[in-house]
Amino acid sequence: MGVDLHNIDALLQEERADEAMDQLAKMTKSWDVEWRQAHAMFIQSNSMEDVDKRRTLCREALSLAESSFTTNPRSSDAAKQAAMLSGSLSESSSSSLEQMKIGVVFKKYLDAAIELMAEPDMVCLHMRGRFSYKVASLSFVERTVACKLVGSLPSCSYDDAIKDLLAADSIESTLENDFILGKAYLGKGDKKMARLYLTRVLEYMSESAIHEEMKEEAKKKLTKL
């Protein structure tokens, strides 16, 4: 089984999700099969244009990742997949209530993944920093409403966001990470550091429409600093 799982990991690394799923379907159900199935389904979902179908697949994948983590709560891989899938469901939801509810689940799995990993993971650190920024930037009214809807929100500050985002940056610098870092420093009131990271955003080559939107927002914020 070990060799087979290594082959599947190679397929997932290359995002050959369909081939990975075919091989996984032939294996006996286990926690280390389930999180890999969840990973493959997450990759498949990213290529789906139909939002409803994408969300349905992500829910199925999240159930597998959660089952894997329940069976082996020391698996950072299972926790990471559960975090990525719940994050995807939260971002694609049109319901503020659902976004908040899933957001709490997202943070739980992120914390677990980061704690369990032998080496720091750039993606997980960025996602947690991004989440902390989002919670820290809620207005008093938004925070009050959120607490009424979901009971309570994780305690997150701009400093929490900055700490994780800087850790992510030490592993790999990306446009998205610098963009959130700049906004976190701005939220904290540190204009000097905000200017540094928002300026860095403009130095990247854009690889998507989202990158262009981030660069435009960074430009607007810089004109006000």
Image (spheres, grey):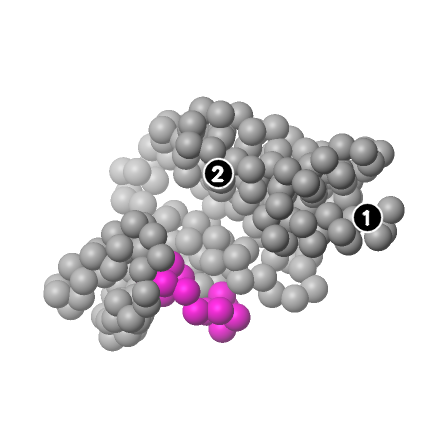
Mark 2 and mark 1: Cα distance apart in space: 25 Å
Q: Is residue 90 left or right of residue 56?
A: left
- Taking the magenta stretch, the answer to whether it contains residue 210 is no
Crowd around label 2: few <14 · some 14–19 · many ≥20 (10 Å): few
Q: Is residue 166 left or right of residue 190?
A: right
Q: Position of residue 5 (x, y in %)?
A: 79, 49
Q: Which mark is residue 186?
A: none
Q: Position of residue 33 (x, y in %)?
A: 76, 40
Q: Position of residue 20 (x, y in %)?
A: 69, 42
Relative depth, front residue between 67 and 185: 67
The residue depicted at 77 percent of the width and 53 percent of the height is 6
User: Mark 1 = which residue?
Assistant: 4
* Three-letter code for the amino acid on which mark 1 is drawn: Asp
Q: Position of residue 74 (x, y in %)?
A: 75, 50
* Three-letter code for the amino acid on which mark 2 is drawn: Ser
Q: Is residue 161 among what the camera can see? A: yes
- Taking the magenta stretch, the answer to whether it contains residue 176 is yes
Q: Is residue 110 above or below residue 31?
A: below
Q: How many marks?
A: 2
Q: Secondary structure at mark 1?
A: helix
Quadrant, the C terminus: bottom left
Would you identify the image quadrant in which residue 17 lies? top right
User: Mark 2 = which residue?
Assistant: 47
Question: Which span is picked out in magenta?
Answer: 167-179
Q: Is residue 198 left or right of residue 223?
A: right
Would you identify the image quadrant in which residue 43 lies? top right
Q: Residue furthest right?
A: 1
Q: Is residue 99 among what the camera can see? A: no
